[in-house]
Amino acid sequence: MGKKGVLLVNLGTPDSPEVSDVRRYLDEFLMDERVIDINAFNRTLLVKGIIVPFRSPKTSKLYKEIWDENGSPLLYYSKIQAALVQEQLGPDYHVELAMRYQSPSIETALANMKAGLVESIQVIPLFPQYASASTGSVIQKVMEIIGKWQTIPPISFVNSFHDNEVMIDTFADNARKFQPETYDQILFSFHGLPERQLKKCDHSGNHCLKTENCCAALTDVNKFCYSAQCHDTARLIAERLNIPEDRYSVCFQSRLGKEPWVQPYTTDTLKALAARGKKRLLVFCPAFVADCLETLYEVTVEYGEEFKALGGEEVQLVPSLNDSPKWISGLVKMVTDQHSSVYTSPDI
Ligand SMILES: C=CC1=C(C)c2cc3[nH]c(cc4nc(cc5[nH]c(cc1n2)c(C)c5CCC(=O)O)C(CCC(=O)O)=C4C)c(C)c3C=C
Ligand SMILES: [Fe+2]
Ligand SMILES: [Fe+2]
C-alpha cells in the first residue's frame, strides 16, 4: 500500500528580509489574480509599477524587526507543525509543507509526493476562515499542477476550519495565562479583505454587505463568507472563555490601498476604545495559525504604539497556535477525520 499524502500550505514569506527578496515575494503574492482581483493589465501596472517598488523597502524594514535566528516566524512554525504532524501520523503518511508563494513551493511538495508514490492527497490550506485570496488561491494552484498529471490521485481539500474545536480550545488555552478577565476589552483582529472580494464570494448575490451586520452571523446562506466565519470564530473563542458579548470586539487589520475593506478596521476600533477610556487590550489574531509579520509587528508594535498615543496603556497579543501540542493533535485529527470520511468506502 502506498502512503497517504498530506499537504499543509500556508501563505508564504520572503526568503530573507532583504529588499530584493521582499520584492520577489510581494511580486508573486500580489500578482495572484485572486489577491489583486482586477484585470491583468491594471494589476501589472499597479503591482509592478507602484506597490512593489514603493512597498518593498518599507516591508523589508518590518521583516527585519521580526526576523530572528530561526528566520521568518511563519516559516519556522509552519515547518515545525508539518514535522510534528508527520511524527504523530507515522510511516503510513507522507506529510509535506508548502507555501503558496516563494518556498518551499507547492510544485516541489507535490513532486515529492509523486516521487513517494502516494496513493491519495489531502490538502489543508492553513487558513481557518475561507477567503478566495488565501484558501481559494491554494486550492486553485494545487488543481492547476495536479490537473496536468497523467494519473490524478484521489484528492481532497479542507475548505475552512473556522469552528474547529481544537483550534478554538488552543487559542482559549493560550489566552488563559494572561487572565482575560483583567483586561478592559478583548479584541479579535482578523486579516482584512477588500469588500469587493466578500461580495464576489456571495453566490446568492443578495446577502453579503446588503444590510447592516449581515456578515456578522453565520447562516446557511453565508456559510462561506469570510467575515461571517471570522465572527463565528471570535464568538466560539469568547464563549469558551466566558467573555460576554459586550467585552469583546471583532475587527479587521492590514488594509492595503484606498478601496473599502471589511470593517470595522482595527485602527478605528482602537480609537473608539481609547475614546471610551479603555486602557488594556488583549488581542487574538485567529486568522493565522502561526505568528507572523501581521501579529508580531502590526499588532504588537504598530497597534501597541498607536493605542498608547491615544492614551491607552497596553496591547497584549495572545500567541498564535504555533507548535502547541494541542494544535498539532488538532491537525492530526483533521487529517484522520477527513481521511475516514472521504476515502473509506462505506460498508455495504
Ligand atoms: C488570513 C489569510 C490571509 C488573507 C485572506 C490575506 C489577504 C490579503 N493579504 C494582502 C496583502 C498582504 N498580506 C501580507 C502579509 C500576510 N498576509 C497573510 C495572510 C492573509 N492575507 C499573512 C500570514 C501574512 C504574513 C506573512 C509573513 O511572512 O509573516 C503582506 C506582506 C506584508 C506587507 O507588505 O504588509 C501583504 C502586502 C492582500 C492584498 C490580501 C487580499 C486581497
Ligand atoms: Fe495578507
Ligand atoms: Fe457576508
Image (cartoon, rainbow, N blue to C red):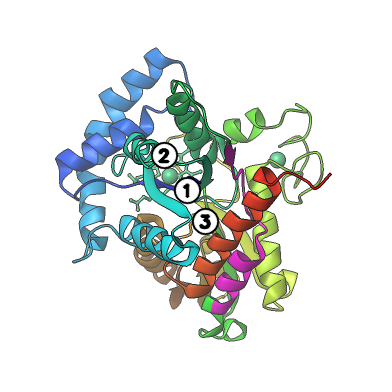
Q: Position of residue 14 (x, y in %)?
A: 25, 45
Q: Position of residue 88 (x, y in %)?
A: 47, 67
Name the element at disc 3.
helix
Q: Is residue 335 magenta?
A: no
In the rendered structure, find residue 273 and report the number of the disc placed on it.
Answer: none
Q: Which of the labelled discs sits on residue 3, or is there none?
A: 1
CB atoms at circles 1 and 2 under 8 Å apart? yes
217 lies above or below 248: above
Ligand 2 located in image quadrant? top left
What residue is at 52 percent from the left and 34 percent from the top?
A: 139
User: Percent from the top left, x then y, of residue 330?
Assistant: 57, 65
Q: Nearer the viewer, mark 2 or mark 3?
A: 2
Residue kind at label 1, given as amino acid type: Lys
Magenta segment range?
Answer: 155-173
Along the horizontal axis of the image, is 148 left or right of 183? left
State the mark number for residue 266: 3
Query: What kind of element bears circle 2?
Result: loop
Helix, strand, or loop for circle 1? loop
Tell me where residue 27 sits by quadrant: top left
* Residue at figure coordinates x 28%, y 43% from the top left: 103
Q: Nearer the viewer, residue 151 or 130?
A: 151
**Residue marked by disc 2:** 117
Point out the tag, 1 or 2, that comes first from the N-terminus.
Answer: 1
Q: Residues within 10 Å of mark 1 (few under 14, many from 20)?
A: some
Residue 331 location in percent, x, y? Answer: 54, 60
Question: Does the CB distance between marks 1 and 3 fall below 8 Å?
Answer: no
Q: Earlier in the sequence, mark 2 or mark 3?
A: 2
Q: Nearer the viewer, residue 21 or 341?
A: 341
Q: Amino acid at mark 3?
A: Thr
Quarter of the picture containing the C terminus is top right
Q: Could you say which is closer to the camera, residue 69 or residue 296?
A: 69
* Amino acid type of the residue that numbered disc 2 sits on in the rendered structure: Leu
